[in-house]
Amino acid sequence: MAGTGTGIVDATGTGPSPFETIESAEEFMHLLHGEIEKAHAEIEVLLAADERADSRQEEALRLVVHKLVQLKSHSDASQRILRDLRTLRNLLLR
């Protein structure tokens, strides 16, 4: 398996991982968080614009909103964990 010089090997063993550092994982989570918020806003617009939608479609859109809220919550928790890990790493490397 190919290494990255840091002892970290990606899942395929062929090259560097996009999550090689805590900072790169934080950047990814920040981008994901923004996309979740965009998707949530778009669905809310669809719900508000189409008041005469059939109940199945509206129910499905409301379920999408619920799942996006769950995903945002998990994203927030992941960002907090990554910050904690970065802080702990910095304390250990002093």
Image (spheres, grey):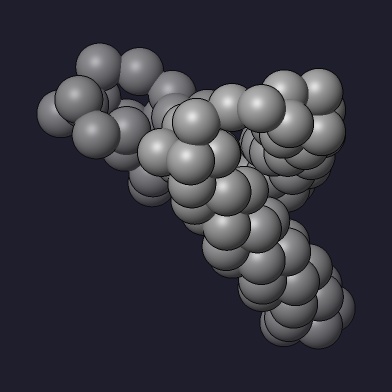
Residue 48 position by quadrant:
top right
In this rendering, is residue 15 above or below 51? above
Residue in the picture at 81% in, 75% down? 87
The answer to whether residue 73 is left or right of residue 70 is: right
* Image location of residue 41, percent across then percent down: 82, 34
64 up-or-down from 66: above or below: above
Is residue 24 something that shows in the picture? Answer: no
* x and y, in percent, of residue 20 in the image: 53, 39
The quarter of the rendered structure image containing the C terminus is bottom right
Front-most of residues 76 and 13: 76
On screen, residue 31 above or below 49: below
Q: Nearer the viewer, residue 84 or 8?
A: 84
List the single residue furthest toward the left.
1
User: Whole-percent x and y of residue 73?
Assistant: 66, 66
Q: Is residue 61 left or right of residue 51?
A: left
Query: In the displayed structure, does residue 7 sit left or right of residue 81?
Result: left
Q: Is residue 16 left or right of residue 31?
A: left
Please report the residue visible at 57 percent of the width from the left and 48 percent of the height from the top. Answer: 62
Residue 92: % across, % down: 72, 82
Instruction: Name the foreground residue: 25 vs 70.
Output: 70
Residue in the image at 38% along x and 46% along y: 7
Q: Where the N terminus falls, by quadrant?
A: top left
Q: Residue furthest front?
A: 52
- The image shows a total of numbered marks equal to 0
